[in-house]
């Protein structure tokens, strides 16, 4: 076209001024400037408009000011938010011609993968001090960062007051208040005001703990008390530290004491040398006492804090073997691994009378999975909600962090709902705004199962999710490319399965999918399950089952599915084992007495590695399929006695009567196992299993151990990982710096290289105890002494106390670099565990670096 034929766009603008002065309230917060720990304090509020008192409602809260300072937090100006001034820069110009162009541009994108950038963070503890003359110090244990939050306080005659108790923290609290009031003649709040005040918690003698956030077995750390003398008196200072627990011990004894002089306004650091000897929880109690030289009453303070010794999960290995005891006895030989930590792990024998008892490792792998996207959060919950109706099954599952089953599931529900977008679908990572269609269907299914199992799902969340799935199953556009239709049909297949499971009847979508001949097996199985739910007498069901059975490869003892897809199924979390499990689910729903279901169950069990399957999707669907099998096929009621024993001890001696998934477990700690096997010929320890009675016994023999980190070589199996350390002014090194100073910053450059495209890759960067990861989202980057790489390929980053997790939804072939920063905080000698990268849904594709020792002076 000639230039004069093209459309032209003209625009104009004007500034609109809105007078909102009568919408602002004058608010004042009055609080005591200073206070002591646990003191009851009163907060006074005053609200006026044009000098006159007003009635209204207030939100009042108190927060540790240091936490607010991390993000430069301030309460938004609600008057400006509700009554904005329109400026020329706020005007948006829309060109309708440009807006219609994308309709005619081919969609060259992966319909399942949405790269989102978000950040998570870990958490720790704070401490403070009280110190009161002449009083015995009660240890301080309450270090809440938000000791006050009241969401609806009545303001009457322009006045309100709030009373609360301060916690045990020695810090400064900021008290904030937002007041709203109706505008005369209106029924909604239209006037707003904000104010704050601070309370500084002080004491004459303050003890501050200086502990690492955690410690690993084999680490040696300084546990310190920092004592500040603000009493105005010199004297003799006593400091005592005690440990309650077996996982941490003093290097030089079982207790620690210090006595020495301290001057006026002097601050003294007292450190004690401790080492971690095994995983577990220890309570650290610190006490200090100042006896003034002038004979006046002493001052005291005390703090009690937890300190956990935890083995590095990337270095803890579990190997297991499984068997079925139909006869009377079995004889097994146990041989210890090579160089391992004697305080970690051991041998365990688990016996149950149902096939579900052999799923302990799979459920444990799901529940303890370290990453937290929407799919993985839902998968962690699935064995608890989908199998809730099986007698005793939930009782055999170990819930982490001391939570009850209900607490664990409720926390998962809350996390999933937090990832629900405005559309009703769910984003893949926290903080995302775009829904992931395939994951949204999966999450909706799990939330529905949770609700059916008796857990509370927030009102409206499921309905919004199901409404979103109704849009997912809508037919594609007429001009959509084949690849878009193909991938769209995969998400439509799981969506119709979920809609049908929840009682909806997506008949039109089912009819359209049944006309698609190139659906992969797992998608066909989803549609079959939906047909069986919506209309079990549908005449097409028999032919659908025949087609499904033709895709299943059978041997005399087992069966499995091998897909031959037209396109890459990675975006749909595909694997052949997962397809086998979904096929088994569909058959159980459509024809529960079909004999191939038992073969599929055996096929699933045979493909476990170390007791579990490769990833969360395989574990989740396999568990549901095997639970279906157990309901249908385990019909013989067990009644037998079984004893598991070595030459030295009886590990299990128990009777099974009736059907139950309850497990009997016998354990031999690693230290004892190493000792006993060392006395036996050939270094092996014999184990006997003797059964008397009717029924089938399933057993699991497992060994958990932690190899010496320093002895592990670097490995590259599809992913090559190189970890390089940099210090300010010091050349880079691939092994950790031998010694660093407390307060020093280290840059960790992680180079990840792959030769093929990988999806959903996790890079696990463990941090040594005694170091703090630096969270760059809190504005810390400006203070870094050196630069680094911020990987464009990173979809999500999480900061935890003991590691930084970096995720890539799509990792293209070639080299990729990302920099993680840590700061040395606690003197001691620690292990720098290996950095590991793995494809989360094909974990056999992974790489890791070597470990290295490091000392903080």
Image (tube, rainbow, N blue to C red):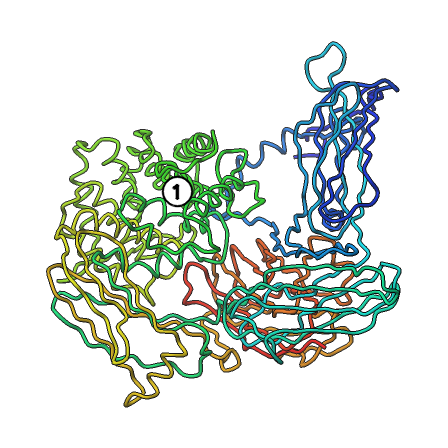
Q: Quadrant of residue 397?
A: bottom left
Image coords of residue 314 (percent x, y): 49, 68
Q: Quadrant of residue 297?
A: bottom right
Image coords of residue 613 (percent x, y): 34, 61
Along the line of sight, which residue is nearer the eye, 626 or 754?
Answer: 626
Image coords of residue 478 (percent x, y): 41, 33
Left or right, residue 525 beside residue 695: right
Does 175 sit above or below residue 355?
A: above
Left or right, residue 282 beside residue 634: right
Along the line of sight, which residue is nearer the eye, 453 or 532?
Answer: 453
Q: Residue at x 29, y 68 (%)?
A: 349
Residue 111 in view: yes
Question: Quadrant where the N terminus lies?
Answer: top right
Label 1 element class: helix
**Location of mark 1 (residue):** 446
Image coords of residue 54 (percent x, y): 79, 18
Q: Residue at x 58, y 53 (%)?
A: 796
Residue placed furthest toward the front: 295
Q: Residue at x 53, y 73 (%)?
A: 217
Residue 568 in view: no
Question: Quadrant where the C terminus lies?
Answer: bottom right
Does 755 sit above or below residue 136?
A: below
Residue density around tag 1, few if under 14, some if 14–19, many if 20 or more, within 10 Å: many
């Amino acid at each position: 076209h000639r230039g004069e034929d093209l459309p032209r766009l003209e625009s104009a603008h004007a500034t609109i001024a809105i007078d909102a002065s009568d919408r602002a309230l004058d608010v004042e917060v009055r609080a005591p400037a200073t206070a002591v720990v646990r003191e009851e304090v009163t907060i006074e509020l005053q609200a006026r408009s044009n000098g006159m008192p007003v009635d209204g409602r207030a939100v009042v809260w108190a927060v540790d000011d240091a936490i607010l300072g991390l993000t430069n937090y301030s309460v938004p100006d609600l008057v400006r938010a509700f009554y904005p001034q329109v400026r020329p820069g706020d005007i948006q110009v829309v060109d309708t011609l440009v807006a219609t162009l994308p309709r005619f541009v081919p969609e060259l994108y992966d319909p399942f993968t949405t790269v989102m950038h978000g950040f998570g963070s870990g958490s720790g503890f704070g401490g403070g001090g009280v110190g009161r003359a002449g009083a015995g110090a009660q240890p301080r244990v309450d270090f809440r960062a938000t000791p006050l939050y009241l969401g609806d306080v009545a303001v009457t005659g322009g006045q309100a007051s709030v009373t609360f108790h301060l916690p045990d923290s020695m810090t400064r609290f900021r008290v904030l208040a937002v007041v709203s009031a109706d505008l005369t003649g209106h029924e909604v709040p239209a006037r707003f005001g904000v104010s704050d005040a601070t309370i500084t918690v002080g004491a004459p003698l303050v003890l501050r703990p200086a502990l690492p956030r955690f410690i690993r077995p084999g680490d040696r750390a300084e546990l310190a008390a920092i004592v500040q003398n603000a009493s105005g008196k010199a004297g003799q200072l006593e400091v005592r530290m005690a440990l309650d627990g077996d996982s941490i011990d003093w290097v030089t004894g079982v207790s620690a004491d210090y006595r020495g002089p301290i001057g006026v306004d002097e601050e003294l650091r007292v450190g004690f040398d401790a080492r971690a000897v095994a995983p577990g929880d220890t309570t650290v109690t610190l006490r200090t006492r100042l006896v003034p030289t002038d004979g006046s009453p002493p001052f005291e303070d005390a703090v009690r804090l937890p300190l956990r010794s935890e083995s590095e999960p990337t270095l803890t290995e579990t190997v297991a073997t499984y068997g079925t005891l139909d006869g009377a006895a079995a004889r097994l030989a146990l041989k210890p691994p090579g160089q391992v930590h004697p305080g970690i792990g051991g041998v365990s024998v688990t016996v149950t009378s149902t096939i579900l008892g052999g799923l302990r490792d799979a459920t444990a792998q799901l529940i303890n999975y370290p990453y937290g996207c929407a799919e993985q959060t839902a998968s962690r919950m699935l064995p608890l909600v989908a199998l809730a109706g099986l007698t005793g099954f939930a009782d055999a599952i170990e819930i982490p962090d001391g939570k009850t089953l209900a607490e664990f599931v409720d926390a998962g529900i809350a996390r999933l709902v937090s990832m629900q977008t405005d559309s009703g679908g769910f984003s893949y990572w926290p903080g995302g705004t775009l829904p992931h269609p395939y994951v949204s269907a999966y999450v909706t299914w799990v939330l529905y199962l949770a609700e059916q199992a008796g857990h509370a799902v927030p009102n409206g969340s499921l309905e919004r999710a199901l409404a979103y799935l109704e849009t997912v199953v809508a037919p594609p556009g007429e001009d959509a490319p084949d690849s878009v239709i193909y991938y769209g049909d995969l998400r439509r297949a799981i969506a119709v399965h979920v809609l049908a499971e929840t009682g909806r009847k997506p008949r039109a979508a089912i009819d359209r999918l049944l006309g698609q001949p190139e659906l992969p097996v797992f998608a066909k199985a989803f549609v079959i399950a939906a047909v069986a739910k919506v209309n079990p007498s549908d005449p097409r069901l028999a032919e659908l089952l025949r087609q499904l059975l033709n895709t299943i490869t059978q041997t005399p003892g087992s069966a499995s599915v091998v897909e031959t897809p037209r396109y890459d199924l990675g975006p749909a979390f595909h694997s052949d084992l997962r397809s086998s499990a979904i096929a088994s689910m569909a058959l159980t729903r459509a024809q529960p007495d079909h004999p191939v279901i038992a073969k599929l169950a055996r096929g699933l069990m045979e493909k476990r590695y170390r007791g579990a399957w490769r990833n969360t999707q395989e574990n989740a669907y396999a568990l549901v399929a095997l639970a279906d099998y157990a309901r249908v096929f385990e019909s013989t009621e067990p009644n037998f006695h079984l004893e598991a024993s070595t030459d030295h001890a009886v590990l299990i001696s128990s009777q099974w009567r009736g059907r139950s998934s309850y497990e009997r477990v016998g354990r031999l700690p690693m230290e004892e196992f190493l000792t006993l096997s060392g006395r036996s010929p050939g270094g092996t320890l014999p184990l006997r299993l003797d059964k008397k009675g009717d029924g089938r016994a399933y057993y699991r023999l497992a060994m958990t151990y932690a190899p010496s980190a320093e002895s592990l070589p670097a490995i590259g199996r599809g992913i090559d990982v190189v970890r390089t350390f940099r210090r300010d002014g010091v050349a880079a090194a691939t092994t950790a710096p031998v010694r660093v100073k407390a307060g020093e910053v280290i840059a960790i450059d992680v180079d990840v290289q792959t030769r093929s495209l990988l999806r959903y890759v996790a890079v696990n960067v463990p941090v040594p105890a005694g170091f703090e990861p630096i969270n760059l989202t809190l504005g810390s980057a400006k203070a870094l002494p050196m630069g680094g790489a911020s990987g464009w390929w990173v979809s999500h980053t999480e900061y935890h106390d003991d590691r930084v997790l970096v995720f890539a939804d799509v990792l293209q072939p070639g080299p990729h670099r990302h920099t993680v920063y840590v700061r040395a905080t606690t003197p001691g000698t620690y292990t720098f565990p290996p950095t590991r990268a793995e494809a989360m849904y094909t974990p056999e594709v992974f790489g890791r670096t070597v470990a290295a020792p490091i000392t903080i002076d």
